[in-house]
Image (spheres, coloured by chain):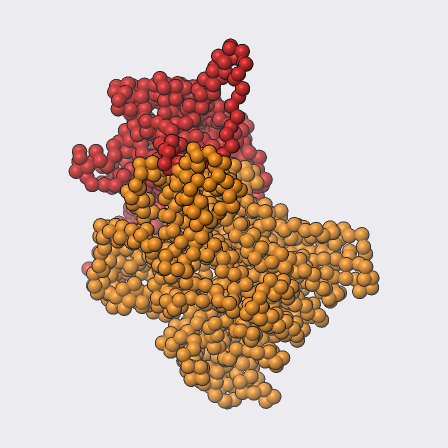
Amino acid sequence: MSTATEYSLENPLAPTPVDPPTEGAHPSAATYEEALEFGREMNERPTRGGGVGRVRVQHAKQRMTVFERIRVLSDREPNLLWQNWGPALDGAALVTGILDIGGRDVAVYGHDFTLRAGSMDATNGAKLARLIYMAAERGIPLIGMNDSAGAFVPAGVGGLDGYSEAFTALRKISGVVPSISLMFGYNAGGGAYLPRQGSFMIQSEETFIGLTGPGVVKSALGEDVTADDLGGPGVHGANGVCDLTTNDELASLRTAIRLLSYLPDNNHSLSLYTETSDPVDRYTEEEDILFRRTFDSPAGLNAPLEITLLMQNICDHGEYFELQPGRARNMITAFGRIGGWVVGFVANNSAVASGQIDVDAARKATRFIRFCNLYNVPLIFLEDTTGFLPGTEQESRGIILEGRRLLDAIIDVRVPSMTLIIRNAFGGAYAAYNSHFVGADRVFAMPHARIAVMGSGGGSEFVFKQELRDIDRAYQQAIQDGQSLEEAARLRDAGVAGVRARYEHELLNPKEALSLGSVSSIVMPGTSRRVLAKNLAFLMRTYQPSAMSGPQRESE
Amino acid sequence: MRGTDLQSRRFHEASSTWLRSFALDDLKVLVVCRGPVRQEAFDLFDAIGVAEYGMLLSEKDSVVFPRCLAPELRSFRFPNNVHRVQDYMGVGQQEKLQRIREIVGIARDHGYTHVFAGYGFMAEDAEFVEAIEQSGLGFMGPSSAVIRRAGAKDEAKKTARGLGNAVIPGIDDVSPRALLRAAGDRRALEALASEHALSQFAWDDDLSLEENAEALLQAGYAKTVELVTIDQLQREAEAICEEIWRDYPGSRVRFKHIGSGGGKGQRVIGDRDAVAAGVMEVLAESKVVERGSNRNFLIELNLERTRHNEIQLIGNGEWCLSLGGRDCSVQMHEQKLVEVSLTQELLDVEIELSEGKALEILRGDKQTLERMETQGERFGEATGLDSVSTFECIVEGFNHFFMEMNTRIQVEHGVTELAYRLRFTNPDDPSECFYVDELIEAMALLARHGPRLPKPERVVRAVSGLEIRINATNQALQPHAGGVIRGWSPPADGEIRFDQGIGHRNPDTGVFIWYNLAGAYDSNIALLLADGATRKENYERMAEILRRTELRGDDLETNLWVHYGLIQWFLGKGVMAEPTTLFMSSYLAGVGALQQRVTDTDVGLALRELLAGAEHPDQQQVLMAKQTLLQRPIERLLEHPHGLAGFLGRYDGELWDATGEAVRFVVNPVRFLEALYHFLDLEERDGAPPSEQIWDHDAGILSNARAFYDEIAARTGATSLDELEKLLGGREDSRLSGGDSELWRRSVAAHRGFQTGLEILLIIPRLGVISDFLSIGVNEELQPVFPAKFTDAANAADCIRALSPPPTAASDEIVTPMGGSFYAREAPDLPSLIAPGDHFEAGQPLFIVEVMKMFNKVVAPFAGTIVESLMEGRDGSVVKKGDVIFRIEPDEQPEVISEEEIAAQRERFTLELLAAR
């Protein structure tokens, strides 16, 4: 605090603390006292960070210090590790430790921005790597609180080496223990890559993530852009860099705790099973109402359906936790619980872009499926899609690559997985989207499901080629016979519509798939929860969680 | 659930035979409404041991919006008693009848004994209640006969007039008048009857022409035959309004559909051009646009400077008892915000505490209250009230006018429950008695054992009771739909919270369930209640509850800060103030005026300016050390205009004096700063997230300062800034230093250090002065008084706009300022309000957004021409705030203010604010 003399913020009238008696003490006691003093100083020094001035600067930006963030994550005393690591014995601008979060051990690291702006060098790179490896060794999840200006420039190559060591550690434990990266402050370069190596990333308002900041962008590219427009949560919530965005640091920390409740500790255990008071065998009349409302409307079976409305009626107490809600909502990825078991939902959402699978949707789903697969989280696919989205834009962005990735991720699934076909399951999407023959443990279909090679337009043209030709011939003939163009066209259109209706009626249904064993059974609306819960319980009873093994495939 | 000190509340477990005879354990109640009363009823039923209960679940509460599953389901004890319905009521007569059949069917099929409708629309629908009665079920609420006699607004006024009650001048038979204008005699009426095959109608010579017309209309409603068109009603209304305006020039009139309630289905109209639209809006909101619906409405003089008081009544058909009053004058957009108990015991206590003019006023109020209670009881007896109802009055000075009877339990019934409990005594054995603390319990008793219940006595529980309504609205109190609640602190000590079960955590995981305020129904989220031994103590408790409440979410806007500001404002200006129903719009204008100046205030800049002016390097250093200590709470206060308003109202005259030329501190500014931290709930608190409390280094400075000045006060008695300046600016005072001149020097330095920079706090009251907000006060007659600019409608609207800045829109488009259901037209059979190619003036209605059942007309912010409608043919679809509705061609390109100009204006104003001494 201020040592100024003319102006002071000390209370001179405070009772002065009584000094411990020194007179008459044994000479060795003084040495002993010194040692104790030294010990106290060592324990305290890291908690002071860069001193009250730097802390004030941090606070002036509405940001908490790393120790304050830790207090939000857990009210238990943290078990801090290697806290004097570094030449200045101050912990080297990085705090590492183990926290008790709701009774679970969680490895935590956080940059101390008040010390050298939380920058990275060889020392704290090594320290971070050690924590990360320890998390993997002990099989506990990792939470990273990133608030770092990047590499410590005076450290030269050492700073870069520090990053490299941390990169390597985090990659090596990827797939071993899950991790959550919280993005605070201003994170560029290595500070952006490192956290994204983890499982989930949460960014709050007033923060930045990017390869480099607006200054460099301006001088290198001449682009004039604010930090928020370049790498704020609005940008990264929409591009998939961040899985979740929040209003402030507090919301990010609380969201991390919520997310953690769905994650297992490591790749050889299950997420926490929570006995539920929500009856698993309840008849869910809402489901029937939802389908009736949607499919009994003028748009009929072409009406869009917000699939989370179904999820909230299937899950225990209606709770689900959506990831990447800011992008590609034609594909919903979410955690939920059914009968107490944590599940991962991969759901086509026809309320957005007809639920077609495009590049972004495929990427979103692929990443989520791979996560669940690695960490023994059973998967539930809710299928309602007319297929992968074609067209020049998608082809040029490589839909074949991304769609293939999704397909391969599904084929690689080794955890219990079930598919419930809500409505549309056409062509390649049907085949790829967790059908029985790519490995689903169960495939169920609603009675109104439409499983076929093609939708009614293309499908009818193919199957009823002759009938359509006849209609066209009759149309030409009618014109020649002097019928009015209008009347002839009306007759032709009615004919085509009839053929389509016939196709829809005869071939857009689950009959064939049932007969081939591709669909296990019909699920009546209102019983999805019951059927899924019963099968999930069986699959989980007979499932041994374990680390993934087997050959590595050529591409992700 | 509220605590209770009663004997077991389960009568069937009582040892006394008499008590056991009132058992309620054979009740199986179907609850057919939603809102906070639903969970409240379930909790009560559990407490009193009702056998079973069930609920209706609408599609909007289950399958229309994500994260919007009725929260009551989380802990619902009877999962098999959840009955799905499309909606809780119907749109139009046909749907309503269908819904009634459906509900009666559900109740009978599942063996319910009683139906409870809370304060839903259905609760005072005579047709609904009659259908229940005829099917052999019990209705927990006033019987259909009472509703017809007392509830229908037209009938009730006749009854009240008959009893000699004062009523408001006006007309209660618009429909019959319109009918008679088209068919003016017996022949014409009979011709109409035969034309529409209304065989129930037969001319009755004993009745007047008007009464026969009414009978024909009733026959028409029964067969859903339209006898009077909306157009005819509009013409008739215009004629009636002309008459009223002839007798009361310059006044406004109020349209009120006979079935209206909760502010819906009412409009206040000031000129002829607005009459037709007003009629349409009233009918649309009351959902009687459908052909054959009963569209009768009242037209009455709108009394402008009145208070809204109401008397809670309870009766069993034989006896009727008043349970005191409630003052509900603090309301906006016809929605009540704050409701406070008004009882004789309260007035006695407050009279004891008053003097001068206030004393006279309160004595007069007590007489008015007594008259209202007596008349209410008489009205209840005359109409055979056999459950609970509210006798609603408006009060101007010491005069009251009967307005209407609400034949149902009301949202604010909890206020009365805080004030009184009921004691029922065994007439055969006066030593035996039992207490009833909740009106819903009384309703159950009346429904099951009504005629046998002896007339109870009312027993005072708390002198004062208070309720506030937490709504999903923005700072201008306009509905805001679509926010998601992500967390809500548990109820504080003394807080009673009815939150529909939103606060019920996931029973499996204990985690708060995110809840979407989708806006399918009204904007009410929760009710908060508290009591006190005086009204002041009551307000203090509520202020403390609100101060400690943490309600967080995503895109969440609520009126929590509005309430906190209001309660604090009243605490500062006088809790016995008597606001009229216009108070809130003027107050909002004042807060808006504050906001207009806050926008131009830059606290960081002001601090930098102080730093630049620091004379001594030590002073600079100290100022830098105090940056967050000062900047953070001031900025946080300015972020919340209603918080700022509350702070100004609460501490005006106590922390500063703004009556002179320059605003000055009246206490040590350190106390001001402490009060600010306290007000914002930013004090040090164990377990609270560090970001939600004072930063540790700032807490250190503040506690040093506090200890320093406490010690000075102890040694010298100096506390005020003047005293301190005199003491520490003068020669060494040995009372302080004890002759230690080094200590004296350090004390002087500490005083300088602690005081440095605190003058920045004065920008808070200066904002109040410059905006004129601090000119709002309460005079000695207890009337809130406003500068004219806050009562002038046009200027007030301008100020209020500052509280809800419109969404950013390009100048070639019209966006919706709120989310909800879009409608291009006022009713399905009407043309759209505007079409491509049409020119519009500023202020002209362009489209309608239904938010939480309110039909909001969105008006053009400027003049232009419609180029394209992006919502063509999409009536009823959901729009989000900021969605583009029309592409347009503006008449004038709006002037764009550059960022530099805005920054320059902020700098100019901030420096002015800082310099004003």
- Which residue lies at the image location 60% right of the left edge and 78% below the top edge? B165
For the question of whether residue B594 can be seen, the reply is no
- Please identify the residue farthest to the top as the structure is shown: A28
- Of residues A97 and B582, the one nearer the viewer is B582
> Which chain wears red?
A
Please state the horizontal and vertical placement of residue A218, each as a whole percent of the image: 19, 37
Query: Chain B in the picture: what colour?
Result: orange
Q: Residue at x 55, y 44 (%)?
A: B490
Q: Nearer the viewer, residue B101 or A298?
A: B101
Q: Is residue B341 visible?
A: yes
Quarter of the figure with residue B811:
bottom left
At horizontal 34% and vertical 54% (from top left) the residue drawn is B917
Q: Judge left or right: residue B87 versus residue B149.
A: left
Total count of labels: 0
Where B593 falls versus A111 (above or below)?
Answer: below
What x and y, as percent, mark residue A466? Answer: 29, 47
In the rendered image, the vertical position of residue B131 relative to residue A159, given as above or below: below
Taking the image as shown, residue B423 lies to the left or right of residue A344, namely right
**Residue B725 vertical placement versus B573 (above, below):** above
Residue occupying image coordinates x 35% and y 66%: B795
Residue B222 position by quadrant:
bottom right
Give how far across and how far down residue A223 sits, in percent: 19, 39
Q: Is residue A3 above or below residue B323?
A: above
Q: Position of residue A69 (x, y in %)?
A: 43, 33
Between B285 and A491, the one lying in front of the other is: B285
Give the quarter of the image for residue A114.
top left
